[in-house]
Amino acid sequence: MYRTNTCGELRISDAGKEVTLSGWVQRSRKMGGMTFLDLRDRYGITQLVFNEADDAALCGEANKLGREYCIQVKGTVSERQSKNSKIPTGDIEIIAKELKVLSPSLTPPFTIEDNTDGGDDLRMKYRYLDLRREAVRKNLELRHRMTILIRNFLDAQQFIEVETPVLIGSTPEGARDFVVPSRMNPGQFYALPQSPQTLKQLLMVAGFDRYFQIAKCFRDEDLRADRQPEFTQIDCEMSFVDQDDVINLFEEMARHLFREIRGVELPRLEQMTWHEAMKRFGSDKPDLRFGMEFVELMDDLKGTGTFSVFNEADYIGGIVVPGCADYSRKQLNELTDFVKRPQVGAQGLVFIKYNADGTAKSSIDKFYTPGQLQKVKETTGAKDGDLVLILSGDNANKTRVQLCSLRLEMGNRLGLRDRNVFRCLWIVDFPLFEWSDEEQRLMATHHPFTMPNPDDIPLLDEHPEQVRAKAYDFVCNGIEVGGGSLRIHDTQLQEKMFEVLGFTPERAEAQFGFLMNAFKYGAPPHAGLAFGLDRFVSILAGLDSIRDCIAFPKNNSGRDVMLEAPSSIDQKQLDELEIKLDLKN
């Protein structure tokens, strides 16, 4: 028997017991004739005591142990003289009687502690060591607990878990696919699924009226803190439901998770239209933990002064930053540099300080009278001591997005984006289509199977850009956690959707004929939703990045630095696949 107990379970009530523990050496301390070791496993830390006066040889063996040695110890549980209130086992220690080295260890490249001295790249290269740290392990334990809660919740709601294939056909209408060559079908390729979208719709046709899956998905796209090339979705689909049915059920699931994981009771969630979200916050995933809503200032500033930038603008908007009228020139220059960054793309920043004494100081003083600046104060609702920051541009939506970046930056600077505060909402009434500069055509905002709002179907022929989707996103703290839509289940309407997207009938048949044919056999009305499990866990764990809630993540270049993947493959494998590489061209 390697152990009778874990390193996290023994208490003062166990004093006098003979126990066997196994784990890793966290640290060692030699004090006179005594050696103290902290032994760690997944469950906690227990202090071991080796007394030179009792057994000099055994104490000598303990002194040879380095950090991260894997050992087994037998001994007696004893009450500690100097207790440690910071750990659950801090009232006891083990008086060691036997020691066995199960596996020695090289000196680890970084400390296996919460506040490690290892950088991100080093920790990712030795991820198996990083996972020994309590802070990282707790994230994976939280992830495990969430998946259990989700499975139990959905099972109680009559959902059935079905695994769908990982090797499927390519569907290039969306993000880029990862493709897999087929040895048995030379020159042909599988794709890894970006989501199980069409497959779960087929399950609805098959009569599995409530489906879910904790599904691996793959997208070959540029990475950010909340994106990985492979990620996990809580993927769900339901038949004979409308939008409110889906929203109500999954809002209750979210409420269940927040209650069980964080002890937070979510209120009934607000539903905000996409148009309203863009107008008020410049984002379809607004962070509602703080204010600073946009105020349009076209009537106050366009054509009322001699500032040509505003007079030529198609949009002028501002935010009120409470209590920041004392911002220095240096701080304001930093904000100007921030909005001019390529990632934001604004041409400049205008400020108005409404000082505590009632006066106003602005970067546009020479273009506007004090009375006009007072009018801006009234329009924005600014108070004495507040700072108003203003952006303008010739494209309203683009400028709102820039103003959103500035709003979030101010929220960060003022500490208003508290990770222990949760503000969730639903965004509804998305545009069905969006224009792609890269493709120079309309693209589906979500995917080609999204149901148009029935009121807008007559617009599909002449004004498709005005058509709203029966789609919905679940947003928490400025992060899109999940989203879904009602699906088209009528073959003719689906054909019309493909036509608007520029598909020829032949191309639509080649890519989606299997789905269109299935719809001819009594397809039920159906809808679905998918939550990003990685994002959901990271929010509830209070993380900046999803990487620390994934066991073996990729870095920002999409590489696994531990496995050195992706990598070249043998020429023999390429020959079997009948693939010829021409890297020179």
Image (tube, rainbow, N blue to C red):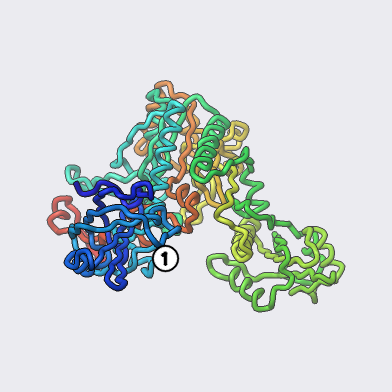
Residue 579, picture quadrant: bottom left
**Residue under circle 1?**
115
* Farthest residue, direction right: 371
Given residues 229 and 94, the one toward you in this image is 94
Q: Residue at x 50, y 46 (%)?
A: 481
Q: Is residue 177 visible?
A: no
**Badge 1, how many Cα within 10 Å: few under 14, some, many 20+?**
few
Q: In which image quadrant can residue 98 be found?
A: bottom left
Residue 549 x %, y %: 40, 53
- Position of 438 relative to 158 (above/below): below
Would residue 366 be found to the left or right of residue 42 on screen? Answer: right
Q: What SS does tag 1 mark?
A: loop
At 87% from the left edge and 67% from the top edge, which residue is drawn? Answer: 371
Q: Quadrant of residue 329?
A: bottom right
Q: Position of residue 526 (x, y in %)?
A: 48, 29
Vertical placement of residue 404 versus 332, above or below: above
Residue in the image at 21% along x and 45% along y:
182
Give whichever of 3, 108 is nearer the camera.
3
Of the 4 image quadrants, the one containing the C terminus is bottom left
Q: Residue furthest front?
A: 53
Name the side, left or right, on which 163 lies relative to 584.
right
**Residue plotted at (44% across, 35% down):** 236
Residue type at tag 1: Asn
